[in-house]
């Protein structure tokens, strides 16, 4: 059986989510492992649980994608911090690499630039991180 990869994506910002998925899928295609399975959740806060479910159900790596754009309240800080902590907890607990491809930005313009725009492609980088961790594990085993 070949390796299976998952992308869990918070769909709160649909256009950004799709851009991030496109970047991540391109990495898996270029690596010759085929497309990852995509699982949708409402937002970034739900990503850790989705990653845990995937890790416990045979996925070799999980790319976590989404976007949180700062607003006028503290909600941004709570969601970003808990999403990051939860995703890290999942990978350390399960041993399944889970990358953090969640945009944590102040503006939509910043999000667009980091989702395949002019500055970086966070979806691509998150998928590359998962593959790098898997390669490291294989090298050392």
Image: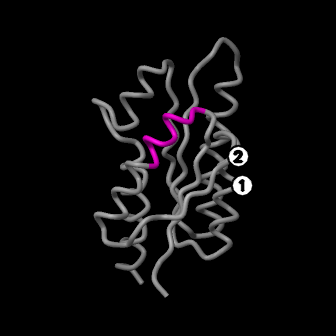
Question: In the displayed structure, does residue 62 sit left or right of residue 115?
Answer: right
**Residue 135 in the image: above or below residue 23:** below
User: Please, what secondary structure does the residue beneath circle 1 have?
Assistant: helix
Q: How many marks?
A: 2
Q: Residue at x 42, y 65 (%)?
A: 133
Q: Quadrant of the C terminus?
A: bottom left
In the rendered image, residue 10, in percent from the top left (x then y), is placed at: 61, 43
Q: Residue furthest bottom?
A: 1
Choose top left, top right, bottom left or bottom right for residue 53.
bottom right
Choose top left, top right, bottom left or bottom right for residue 51.
bottom right
Question: How many C-alpha atoms fall within 10 Å of the one at disc 1: few (<14), some, or many (≥20)?
Answer: some
Residue 108 lies within the magenta run: no
Q: Which mark is residue 49?
A: 1
In the rendered image, residue 68, in percent from the top left (x then y), is placed at: 58, 30
Query: Which residue in the structure is indicated by mark 2?
Result: 46
In the rendered image, residue 112, in percent from the top left (x then y), is placed at: 41, 28
Question: In the displayed structure, does residue 134 sit left or right of residue 71?
Answer: left
* Of 32 and 68, the residue lying toward us: 32
In the rendered image, residue 45, in percent from the top left (x then y), is placed at: 69, 41
Q: Residue at x 30, y 67 (%)?
A: 31
Where does the magenta region start and end? 13-21
Residue 19 lies within the magenta run: yes
Q: Residue at x 35, y 41 (%)?
A: 121
User: Please, what secondary structure does the residue beneath circle 2 have?
Assistant: helix
- The answer to the question of whether label 1 and label 2 lie on touching residues, with beta carbons closer than 8 A, is yes
Q: Which mark is residue 18?
A: none
């Amino acid at each position: 059986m070949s390796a299976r990869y998952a992308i869990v994506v918070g769909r709160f910002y649909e256009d950004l989510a799709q851009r991030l998925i496109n970047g991540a899928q391109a990495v898996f295609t270029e690596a010759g492992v085929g497309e990852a399975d995509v699982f949708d959740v409402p937002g970034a806060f739900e990503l850790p649980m989705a990653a845990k479910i995937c890790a416990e159900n045979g996925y070799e790596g999980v790319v976590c994608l989404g976007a949180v754009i700062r607003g006028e309240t503290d909600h941004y800080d709570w969601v970003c911090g808990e999403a990051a902590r939860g995703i890290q907890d999942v990978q350390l607990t399960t041993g399944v690499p889970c990358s953090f491809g969640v945009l944590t930005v102040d503006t939509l313009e910043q999000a667009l630039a980091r989702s395949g725009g002019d500055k970086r492609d966070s979806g691509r980088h998150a998928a590359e991180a998962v593959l790098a961790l898997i390669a490291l594990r294989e090298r050392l085993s």
